[in-house]
Amino acid sequence: MVGIPRRRLLALAMAGALPAAPRIDDPFTLGVASGDPLPDGVLLWTRLAPRPLEPSGGLPPVRYPVQWQVAEDSRFTRVVRDGTYTATPEYGHSVHVDVRGLRPDREYHYRFRCRGHVSPPGRTRTAPARTASPAALRFAIASCQAYGDGYYDAWRHLATEDLDVVLFLGDYIYEGAITSVGGDRMDSSLRLPDTFELETDTLDLYRMRYALYRTDPDLQAAHAAFPWVLTWDDHEVQDNYADGASRSTAVAARDFLVRRANAYRAYWENQPLRRPRQPAGPDMSLYRRFRFGDLAHAFVLDTRQHRSDQACGDNLRAGCDARDDPRRTLLGAEQRDWLLGRMQRSPARWNVLAQQVMMAECRYGGAAGRLDMDKWDGYAADRARILELAARMPGTVVVSGDIHYNYAADLRPRADAPVVAVELVGTSISSGGDGSDSTPQLDLQLRYNPHLRLANAQRGYVRCELGRDSMRADFRVMSHVTRRGGTIATRASFVSDRVRPGLVTA
């Protein structure tokens, strides 16, 4: 729903063109967020939900005018943009304000008002001008936050970092059942409705699942601290789905597309995404590019919606010749051609590929071990095309999520070729519970995958800084997540040269 000027809104209300909205309790229980920063603007988000764990958020099916403000200071004495947005029941009373006319590379503060209530404030930042030459870009990568697996203390720590943007790489929600006390969080004060014990498949169930996650104060703090750029992985719909193929062979394709349409609709409603990303039925255009002056271009990819079904099943396999079939694709032809074309013409010093699944080859269990067909290992032709281009494009960095482990890897088009890019795989925020520094499986991976520089199974996120000529990555890990009060520490740090890529311990 587009914003309505305040004078026009008042005139419509006085004329009776808008139904009267009843008085409500605090509608801002899900916090605020900003995302997809541009040099002249940013997307602001909230969703009205006075009773968030109900299907409609506790609101009647009427429209609500929501006022918004953007200011240069945290006290909102220097307001530079404001307006009114109409939140409608058709889109879950979500608010997506595409603010333009801001100054590049500036910090701003924002908030919303509705029916006498004021939202928590948020802080955001615009991207540098396209012609600017920033000295650095500071960002974090994070993914995989299963609500029932642990607390979100990692978000609390991330909210205090000095960052320009957060890249979230998928699995914002998990579709499986959650017990009434929230799983392994063991929160005795929490009593979820029985509907949370159902796997999500309807629009109402997906909306309620997002609402549960967004009630967490630490997640709200991280959203309010920085602009986010998000993409999804599989659990926003169903574990290991591929395009229109359900993981369950008993589900007809047409039925699965109905579920996918529900999931995509709820995803857009609950994330800071612009209207052009709004889904049309079971389809949603999510891949896109962001520019940070001449320093970096970030290519945000979608490795779920357009992929060929997994070769040889969606688990670990050895000797799967089908994975080398050049007709198989992880990105789909249109997205792959878009990526290769824009990378090839990119004038930036760094090209960051923000995507979901591990790109580096990773053998499990020995030199002739199994490969994971759900990752880029199952789509060798697409990977080869990208790495062959990276060999001609200095400054390629791949950032990934999905796997609940920290990995640092050098990327080569072939085993005997020079390093052409580097990959940072971030662990989960909470998925998998506390984890550990090492496991027998990770020890074997380090032994039989010499391009891996780190393999770690703790929770946390990766903090990155791109300079003009080098990159630094700090793997930040949590002491624990299954009980409150986890502390954060840097497990390992690496640097890589833009022209001569390769991860070196810092």
Image (tube, rainbow, N blue to C red):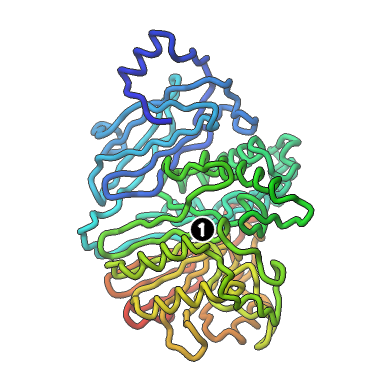
Q: Is residue 426 left or right of residue 203?
A: left
In which image quadrant can residue 112 be found?
Answer: top left
Instruction: Name the residue type under label 1.
Output: Asp
Relative vertical location of residue 288 with respect to residue 469 in this rendering, above or below: above
Q: Where's the C terminus, which quadrant?
A: bottom left
Relative vertical location of residue 141 with respect to residue 116 in this rendering, above or below: below
- Circle 1 packing at 10 Å, graded few (<14), some (14-19), many (20+), is many
Taking the spot 67% from the left edge, 56% from the top edge, the residue there is 245
Taking the spot 67% from the left edge, 87% from the top edge, the residue there is 368
In which image quadrant can residue 422 be found?
Answer: bottom left
* Residue 188, x across and y down, in percent: 72, 41
Relative vertical location of residue 85 with respect to residue 163 in this rendering, above or below: above
* Residue 220, x across and y down, in percent: 49, 43
Q: Secondary structure at mark 1?
A: loop
Q: Name, please, the residue furthest toward the front.
A: 327
Q: Where's the N terminus, which quadrant?
A: top left
Nearer-the-camera pick, 474 or 402: 402
Taking the spot 52% from the left edge, 63% from the top edge, the residue there is 331
Q: Is residue 29 visible?
A: yes
Nearer-the-camera pick, 263 or 218: 263
For the image shown, how many numbered marks are present on the structure? 1
Q: Name, please, the residue furthest toward the bottom.
A: 416
Q: Is residue 486 visible?
A: no
Taking the spot 45% from the left edge, 15% from the top edge, the residue there is 18
Q: Is residue 206 left or right of residue 288?
A: right
In which image quadrant can residue 53 be found?
Answer: top right
Q: Which residue is mark 1?
A: 302
Nearer-the-camera pick, 286 or 440: 286
Relative vertical location of residue 179 with respect to residue 233 in this rendering, above or below: above
Q: Is residue 345 left or right of residue 320?
A: left
* Residue 467, x across and y down, in percent: 30, 69
